Amino acid sequence: MIKIKNLHKKFGKLTVLDGLDLEIDKGGIFAILGPNGSGKTTLIKALLGMVIPSKGDISIDGNSVLKKWNYRNELNYLPQIANFPANLSVIELIKMVKNLRPKTPNEKELIDLFGLNEFLNKKLGNLSGGTKQKVNLVLTFMFDSDLIILDEPTTGLDPIALIHLKNLIKKEKKSGKTILLTTHIMSVVEELADEIVFLLDGKIYFKGSVEKLKKQTSQTNLEHAIANLITKQNA
Amino acid sequence: MLKILKYSIFDLLRSRWSYVYFTFYLLLGFVLLFLNNDVNKAVITLMNIIIVLTPLIGTIFGVMYYYNSKEFTELLLAQPIKRSQIFMGQYLGISLSLTLSLVLGLGIPFVMYGLFKSTAIFDFSLLILIGSFLNFIFVALAYNIALSTENKIKGFGYAILMWLFLAVIYDGIFMISLIIFNEYPLDKFSLFATMLNPIDLSRILILLKLDISALLGYTGAIFKDFFGANIGAFTSILILMLWVVLPLRRIKYKLKRKDF
């Protein structure tokens, strides 16, 4: 479904992506992992068209998406840090994003799920980090798209919201969606991910299931397996 | 693009600064009319203020809006909208809301004072037209600077320098070169140099329409010949338009290459 070929990206002298090749099939949950600064967010932003690659190609369903914009209608994105305009209320922001996309949203259900009803008329500037993240989640999941990209979705969430989020992701997977997510919380990866894509120095260093990773590194614990991957490279 | 434009205007109309700006013009209009007691004289004083102030406010608003809405712009960039439409919508939103403040803020006192019955109506309209042009020009220039400068403080600094250069320093250099090259015929040069600065161009355009060009001496006569004729006025408006179009083209060019 997603095909990334020989992707290069440099920011000035700093090489972030260095000839990355990746194929992601339709359906399933893919965890994009890697140490800080390994290029996870750059990869995601290149997929979204926010970062323009120095070289290489990205195609979704066989069509190149570079310099295009309408493919984003089939894509939901949860940004890493949710900073919304401070003088807008929650409901106004939701209405505005609804207005920008042609699809029919189902925001009511999600607002109830995350208990946001009492915050709807509050200004976004006055919300706590966790509540902002919930608003962020509503904006991401309210449209029915084939591809869902989540950049650190668990940030700031309380345990109940986290359970709701996990169930939501599982539900989307069941209906055949492709979900890409980055996170530093290994329990989430272990519980959700069908496949791990491990990024290091701007390349794919490992791609496969959690089991395969554990076997390859001869570790029983995912956290240690990942740590093993990182240190092996550095040694 | 219209959706973004609508949102930007809505957002700005809620911001306190739009009202501060509007109230400032409103007070300015009333005070000038009260002090001068004559619409014609008030228009001349007003010109001196508009020519320096609208560029400054346009520059500051442009840079401020860009940096303040940066995160939100990133949210928009992930939506199915074309990049250039997001930024054009924001640009038009700022320029239009500033122009609205200018037109209403000055229009209300002058109309109340009996603008429609006075002879100054043409001069006043020209002044408002040029003020609007300066808004569109300087917001575009400010957006250019903000797009090219990642660092907020640096961006503000460059923008203020740009305004200072066009509003003050340019004139200084112009004057010095006129003194140094005193021996040579300078009429063509000064005409050309005036064209290159939107603030100077606006100033001369208004001065000549106000019929006080006698103060400008020989060069003034040449200017009067050029700007007073239809071709001159037409060329000036054309150049002011170029001052809007060229920065906008650069914004588009820059957007095609920028990472967010």
Image (spheres, coloured by chain):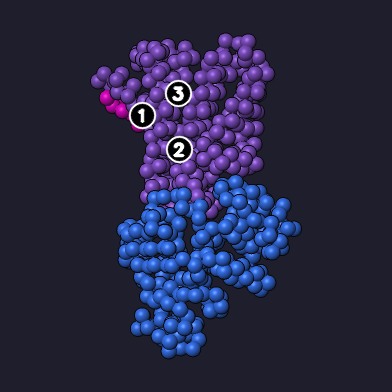
Chain colours: A blue, B purple
Q: For the magenta stretch, what is the residue range?
A: B173-181
Of discs 1 and 2, which sits in the foreground? 2
Q: Are marks 1 and 3 in contact (CB under 8 Å)?
A: no
Identify the mark at residue A235; answer none if there is no mark.
none
Q: Residue furthest front?
A: A175
Q: Chain of mark 3?
A: B
Disc 1 marks a residue whose amino acid type is: Leu
**B228 w.r.t. A27: above or below:** above
Q: Secondary structure at mark 3?
A: helix
Q: Earlier in the sequence, mark 1 or mark 3?
A: 1
Q: Is B175 within the magenta?
A: yes
Q: Are marks 1 and 2 in contact (CB under 8 Å)?
A: no
Task: Give the residue number, with chain letter if any, for mark 1.
Answer: B196
- Residue A173, position in %: x, y? 55, 68
Q: Earlier in the sequence, mark 1 or mark 2?
A: 2
Q: Which residue is at a point 51% across and 52% down the rendered structure image?
A: A73
Q: Nearer the viewer, residue B238 or B135?
A: B238
Number of dots carrying numbers: 3
